[in-house]
Image: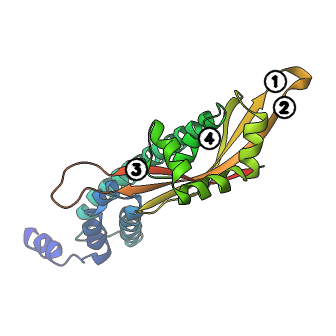
Amino acid sequence: MEHLENMAEETRDVSVTAIAGGVLSLTSPLVLLSDKMLFLPITALLLICAALLSMAVRRQAMIGRNAAVWGLYFSLFFIAAGWVSAKTFRNSEVESAKHFASQWFQLMTTGRQLEALQLENPRLQRAKGVGILRRYTTEQSYIDSYDAFMKNDAVRCILREFQDAEIRFVKLENITFSRRLTSYFVVFELAKGEGLMRKSRQFRIQIAAAKEYPKEGERGQKRYEWTTRIVEVL
């Protein structure tokens, strides 16, 4: 009898699908580097489920079952971890976008349009103090950009009607992500006055974050250089 049991053990079928799913699940930690890698643990999970279902239908223990079970737990864990990581990353970017956009509106509603205009440039290219005024009164390219900025309907509306207004975030639109650039359309509402005299308008600006990564051999995390792009009144 013992000899027959050993022979039965030796002749068990091999589940290639289960083994493939178990091996593929070992790549699951890559989701912590990028949410685009989420397809790896999901694919592993589908393979493992198909293998376990096949074993259940055939009612036969097969070589690869243990790999499938461990791969099932492993892939499920990293699917959840990848989802949490992606959600945390997205929430962080959304809060950064809202903060940067609110800075723009704070400058505009306090009559500091030259400083707001500076936000069209990456941080390293922004002038400070008297350098802002000098730049926009002596350099032709900046004089032209200031003229174009002041002709924008939304800019004129803010400066004319919404100085010292209340600023309220409304929503984000058209969010796009890539390795090098993140872009949002951010809608804010400006309101001023009380009761029947209260007036409010919504404004949309586009902001973009150019991402700078540490060079090879350098330490540190990627940095974001937020800039504004478009202004329009809704």
Secondary element under disc 2, as helix, strand or loop, is strand
| Crowd around label 1: few <14 · some 14–19 · many ≥20 (10 Å) | few
Residue 77 shows in this picture = yes
Provide the residue designation for mark 3: 224
Asked if the residues shown at circle 2 and circle 1 are in contact, with their CB atoms under 8 angstroms apart, the answer is yes
Give the distance between the C-alpha atoms of the residues marked 2 and 3, in whole angstroms: 35 Å
Kind of residue at disc 1: Gly
x 44%, y 52%: residue: 122
Provide the residue designation for mark 4: 113
Give the distance between the C-alpha atoms of the residues marked 1 and 3, in whole angstroms: 36 Å
Kind of residue at disc 3: Tyr
Location of the N terminus by quadrant is bottom left
Q: Nearer the viewer, residue 95 or 55?
A: 95
Provide the residue designation for mark 1: 193
Indicate which disc, 1 or 3, sits on the residue closer to the N terminus. Answer: 1
Kind of residue at disc 2: Lys
x 38%, y 70%: residue: 47
Secondary element under disc 4, as helix, strand or loop, is helix
Provide the residue designation for mark 2: 199
Q: Position of residue 23 (x, y in %)?
A: 24, 68
Give the distance between the C-alpha atoms of the residues marked 2 and 1, in whole angstroms: 6 Å
Vertical comparison of 133 with 5: above or below: above
